[in-house]
């Protein structure tokens, strides 16, 4: 969070943006949010697929149906 706050301060003109963003990027890699995949459970990677084109299609359709009813 310190790195995120540094970006906020840099946006206000109180610091160097590139250094602050580099700190945020390094933190995300350290947390496993970016960088190489660190797990392998054998499941297919469906990250960049539309839900309707995955095994979750029925679930996604149910979400859309509930949204339209409200």
Image (spheres, grey):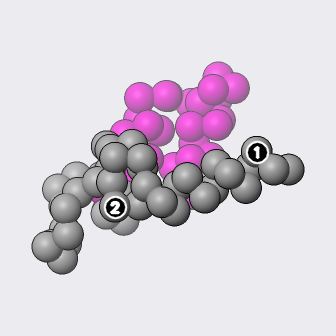
The CA distance from mark 2 to mark 1 is 22 Å
10 Å crowding of disc 1: few (<14), some (14-19), many (20+): few
Q: Looking at the picture, how far across and down is residue 2, in whole percent? A: 56, 55
Quadrant position of residue 22: top left
Residue 68, numbered label: 1
Q: Nearer the viewer, residue 7 or 68?
A: 68
User: Is 3 placed above or below 62 here?
Assistant: above
- The span shown in magenta is 1-30
Q: Nearer the viewer, residue 49 or 10?
A: 49
Residue farthest to the bottom, as pictured = 41
Residue 29, numbered label: none
Disc 1, SS:
helix
Kindly report the secondary structure that dominates the magenta region of the rendered protein: helix
Residue behind mark 2: 55
| Residue 26 belongs to magenta span | yes
Disc 2, SS:
loop
Q: Looking at the picture, how far across and down is residue 12, in whole percent? A: 69, 26
User: Is 15 placed above or below 56 here?
Assistant: above
Query: Left or right: 32 with respect to 5?
Result: left
């Amino acid at each position: 969070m310190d790195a995120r706050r540094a970006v906020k301060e840099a946006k206000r003109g109180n610091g160097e943006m590139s250094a602050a963003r580099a700190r945020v990027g390094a933190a995300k890699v350290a947390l496993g949010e970016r960088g190489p995949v660190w797990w392998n459970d054998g499941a297919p990677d469906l990250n960049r697929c539309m839900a309707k084109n995955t095994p979750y299609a029925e679930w996604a359709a149910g979400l859309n149906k509930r949204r339209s009813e409200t």
